[in-house]
Amino acid sequence: MHALQTTSLRVADNHLFILDQQALPQEKRWLSADTVAELVGHVHALRVRGAPLIGLSASLLLALLAERGANRDQLAQALETLRAARPTAVNLMNNLDRMKQVLAQQTFVPALTAEALRLIDEDKQLCDSIAQAGSALVTAGSRLLTHCNTGGLATAGVGTALGVIALAHQQGKVASVWVDETRPLLQGGRLTAWELGELGVPYQLITDSMAASLMAKGQVDAVWVGADRIAANGDVANKIGTYSLAVLAKFHDVPFYVAAPQTTLDPLCPDGDAIPIEQRAAAEVTGVAGSFGTVQWAPEHAQVYNPAFDVTPAALISGWVLDSGVVTPAEVANGAFQPK
Ligand code: MRU
């Protein structure tokens, strides 16, 4: 495979590397992600993260393993192990379904490489289209609020919700961005703050519990988030804390937008109750670990509940901003996301 570089993925000399998103922003460190075990470990540790990026990294690795001589059975097994790495993100399953179809072809080695590279190119285009569609919804002087990280780090392109915000900023429409720090792994505080800084977008970092009082004071004009999976009825799984933002937005009459590529749609999933939610380690809540070290603040044997995602019901969503354009609540109610 030829050399390739996105914000968070790199192929060099036929080896896959990922930008360690646990180390950012203190350190820009590239790690080998060249075996299934390595990549799955990175996904679990959120060193590779963001639903689109996880799907793309798994597809690239599969193509590289094929180029190195893995046979069809070995690749099929690798594919299933990768598929299980993040149960909530349907982009991973959607991308790997495409790779699986190609694996059935006679000359699957070059075809897998071509398909993985196509997925990367497509993701860039999907991000651009989402940004175009979404930025049209941003009104001049907007104070936007976003959760988690949905930028270039999480995709092969400009990002989803953060791509919208970046383009709206270029268009001179963004007054400022409230960035939820995003518990428990601080993707907002570390990654979104870093990306917005690099893009020159004015922002203020807040803890996740501050959105309510900001909305009550009329300081938020719209909320923009990404998605790990969109069910057929429009329910959306996204980073834990998204649902509470949507409830707050509804109460305060603030528009709440979900930005995602078509690879995030799951027409076969009827509603949010059917979306599997990954549970994560207690240590992420009893303390914090990162490039700065490890701190534990909870008692040693504290019991913890730590779901990685929550589900926002369709009724709380003002618009689903896809690469194909903005889908309205009425269109969703009329079956826009139902199987064709
Ligand atoms: O656990 P993370 O940091 O990977 O969670 C990311 C999100 O929830 C994003 O909103 C989603 O994956 C879309 S990223 C473009």
Image (tube, rainbow, N blue to C red):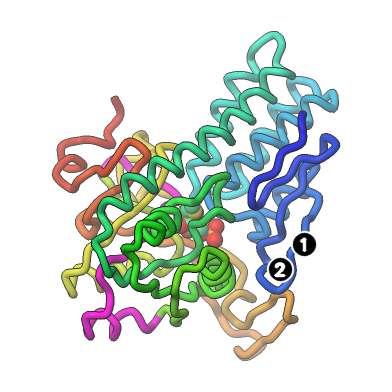
Q: Residue at x 48, y 37 (%)?
A: 125
Look at the numbered discs 1 and 2 and tell me whether their residues touch, using CB distance below 8 Å: yes
Residue 45 in which image quadrant: bottom right
Quarter of the figure that contains the C terminus: top left
Quarter of the figure that contains the N terminus: top right
In the rendered image, is residue 123 in sight? yes
Query: Residue 117's x, y, as percent?
Result: 63, 30
- Looking at the rendered structure, the secondary structure element under dot 2 is loop
Q: Distance between the residues labelled 1 and 2?
A: 7 Å
- Looking at the rendered structure, the secondary structure element under dot 1 is loop
Q: Is residue 195 magenta?
A: no
Q: Residue at x 61, y 25 (%)?
A: 115
The amino acid type of the residue labelled 2 equals Ala
In the rendered image, is residue 277 in sight? no
| Mark closest to the chain's N terminus, 1 or 2 | 2
Residue 298 in which image quadrant: bottom right
Label 1 beta carbon less than 8 Å to ligand 1: no
Question: Which mark, residue 99?
Answer: none
Relative to 275, is 152 on the left or the right?
right
Query: Residue 169's x, y, as percent?
Result: 39, 61
Query: Residue 173's x, y, as percent?
Result: 31, 63
Mark 1, residue position: 29
- Residue 196 or 178: which is nearer the viewer? 196
Above-or-below relation of 324 to 101: below
- Residue 202 or 295: which is nearer the viewer? 202
Q: Which residue is drawn at 59% across and 84% down?
A: 302
The amino acid type of the residue labelled 1 equals Arg
Residue 22 in which image quadrant: bottom right
Mark 2, residue position: 23
Query: Residue 43's x, y, as percent?
Result: 65, 53
- Is the residue marked by circle 2 packed among few (<14), some (14-19), or many (20+) residues within 10 Å? some
Give the residues drawn in magenta, as a range. Answer: 209-233
